[in-house]
Image: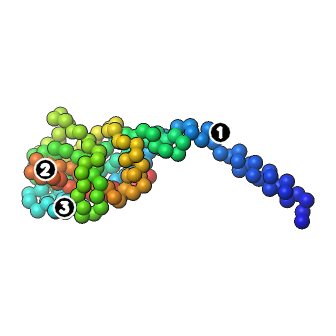
Amino acid sequence: MNRWSPALAVAVSLLVAGCGSDNPTAPTATKPTFTAAMSAANEVPPITNAESGARGTATIVFNTTVAGGQITAATADFTVNLTGLPPNTTITASHIHPGAVGVNGGVVVNLGLTAGEIVTNASGAATITKNGIAVDAALAQTIINNPAGYYFNSHSTLNGGGVARGQLVRTQ
């Protein structure tokens, strides 16, 4: 056996240990990002009225603070683009819900659109941007761990239960 083997093993162990953080509980920020390809056909039940052509994309960025390996705080930024709507469609609400494909669930993250943010667009397209929405830290972690178990949808005056829906997919 080479007489340097034990010394080399100790040196490598110290090097590996030294590569860790000096403070493992120091907060760090992360930005998990999700998209949802939304469609009226994805709603449960599917939309079959004048808004059946609704489609769009939601991009959701979680702004999380992590300490000790756990999310301690979270907010979300949303950008929603909808098209294929009849002219003058009013979008009244947008949310994240728990639920796999084909399953409806209650609201867990509400964009909280106010009267001035409700979108009506004469061309049949709508864009919603909403930043800094509070998200429970434990819920944020659950969504990060299983985005396919959640969906995003927008609601209209005609389709109060939802006009376009898409499952979350983590992209970053």
Which residue lies at the image location 46% right of the left edge and 43% below the top edge? 71
Give the Cα separation between the discs numbered 3 and 2.
Answer: 12 Å
Q: Nearer the viewer, residue 65 or 36?
A: 65
Q: Residue at image x 34%, y 38%?
A: 134
Q: Earlier in the sequence, mark 3 or mark 2?
A: 3
> On the rendered image, what quadrant is the N terminus found in?
bottom right
**Amino acid type for the residue under numbered disc 2:** Gly
- Camera-side residue: 31 or 145? 145
Nearer the N terminus, badge 3 or badge 1?
Answer: 1
Q: Image quadrant of residue 117?
A: top left
Query: What whole-number distance in Å separates the C-alpha atoms at marks 1 and 2?
Result: 52 Å
Spot occupied by residue 116 in the image (x, y as percentages of width and height):
18, 34
Residue 51 at x, y percent in the picture: 12, 56
Residue receiving disc 2: 160
Q: Percent x, y for residue 147?
A: 37, 56
The answer to whether any part of residue 121 appears in the image is no
Q: Residues within 10 Å of mark 2 (few under 14, many from 20)?
A: few
